[in-house]
Image (cartoon, rainbow, N blue to C red):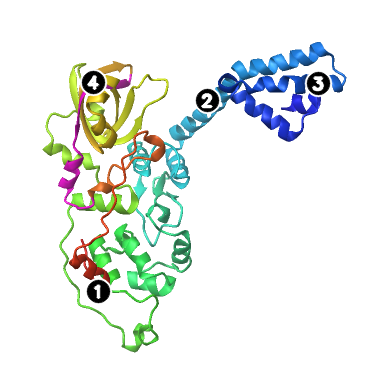
Amino acid sequence: MQIAVVGAGYSAEEADQLRRSLASFRRMGTIAHHRDRFVKGMLANGYSREVAEACFSQIEGFADYGFPESHAAAFAMLTYVSSWLKCRYPAIFACALLNSQPMGFYAPAQIVRDVREHGVEVRPICVNSSVWDNTLERRADGSWALRLGFRQIKGFREEDAGWIVAARGNGYPDPESLWLRAGVLPSVLERLAEADAFIGMGLTRRDAFWQVRAIRAPKPLPLFSDPLDGEGIREPKVELPAMHLGEEVVEDYVAMRLTLRAHPMELLRPAISGLTPHDQLIDAPLQRTSVCGLVITRQRPGTASGVIFLTLEDETGVSNVVVWPRVYDRFRRIVMGGRLLRVTGRLEREGIVVHLIADHIEDLSHRLADLGHPLDEAIGITQPQADEAPRPVRQRPTARHPREQAKHLFPSRDFH
């Protein structure tokens, strides 16, 4: 671009058009349109025709080889720097990735799982410790722990997080004090309860949600704003049934798209026989093997002749699955729509890289309902940029049962 501007008298806009033509040289051939303009410009600036044509020939050569080379060098530098940071400062690297979402192939759940596998403590969202962004907290041993921020809660606003942090002081003793001091709406308190953000107060998700549902006004009434005047209402303590682990895991995915409790496959594996965990594939015999996991990427590169590459995640890591076109034709619907897949095939291994060449694929997405929660569809949602066959969005029915309509007309403190 600088040669075109200085030597051929290009304007900045014309030089940018030349740059764009370099990227599309092989596909469009548009760089040839610049030859006459470039040569005439250099002749007008006192250069000989031989020099002008030699310069343009070098630019054409750059389009043929140098342009892809420069891009490869740029990506190689990014890969090297990212790998260096991830190796030496995994907590900082993961924190930066989470704060940059949405981006990349991997969802927050995979980033959190990976950083925990590398020995980093990940602390939950807490109304008394979290801020909007994910942050780092120093541990007693001097290492860093990753504290999840309010940004991880689906539908949560940065403005509400700002009010919560500003009014926090020495901490909130209960949900009502947060409502009184931060001035947030009851709906905000509900999102915090659904994300289990009151756990630092010693409240379970259900206990917190029960207390929050008692707060319905957008702001305190003057008569009840001062608990010291004896007019405050205190309800008797209730004993709510505890949620089992599967329900907690699904609730985490519904509220935050990730969980710090247990991977769904860890809970489902005892009921699904004949599976090999990912961490055992490196030593497994090269024979017919079955793996099962959540689909996190589903790619079909244009240069792969129709081959599908699946990445399945279980509680021990991720497995690489190769689906040849003939296998894809047999299991197309399952490959495109499944969230939890069981894949059987032949293992191939080269060094530490292991691939499973699929010959049979089974959709076990329905087994997620075994976790005991009706909202199991929140688990296994892939990133759009990581999925070339995105799962179709199901339309919610507009007609509702009269009982569901009554819940909207007469809201109660129901919980699930």
On screen, 385 above or below 50? below
Residue 29, picture quadrant: top right
- Residue in the foreground of this view, choosing between 324 and 185: 324
Residue in the foreground of this view, choosing between 18 and 206? 18
The tag on residue 283 is 4
Is 399 contained in the magenta span?
no
In the image, taking residue 391 as reference, residue 79 lies left or right, namely right
- Residue drawn at the location 71% of the way across and 27% of the way down: 1
Q: Quadrant of residue 358?
A: top left
**Three-letter amino acid code at disc 3?**
Lys
Closest to the observer: 314 or 397?
Answer: 397
- 151 w.r.t. 45: above or below: below
Label 2 and label 3: CA atoms lie apart by 38 Å
Q: Are marks 4 and 1 in contact (CB under 8 Å)?
A: no
Query: Which residue corresponds to the image point at 81% horizontal and 23% vertical from the top-left?
Result: 41
Q: Position of residue 116 (x, y in %)?
A: 34, 40
Q: Which one is earlier in the sequence, the residue at label 4 or at label 3?
A: 3
Residue positioned 26% across, 53% down in the render = 251
Give the residue at mark 3.
Answer: 40
Q: Amino acid at mark 4?
A: Asp
Highlighted range, magenta: 352-375
Residue 378 locus on image (x, y percent): 28, 48
Residue position marked by numbered label 1 in the rendering: 410
Image side of residue 357 versus residue 118, left or right: left
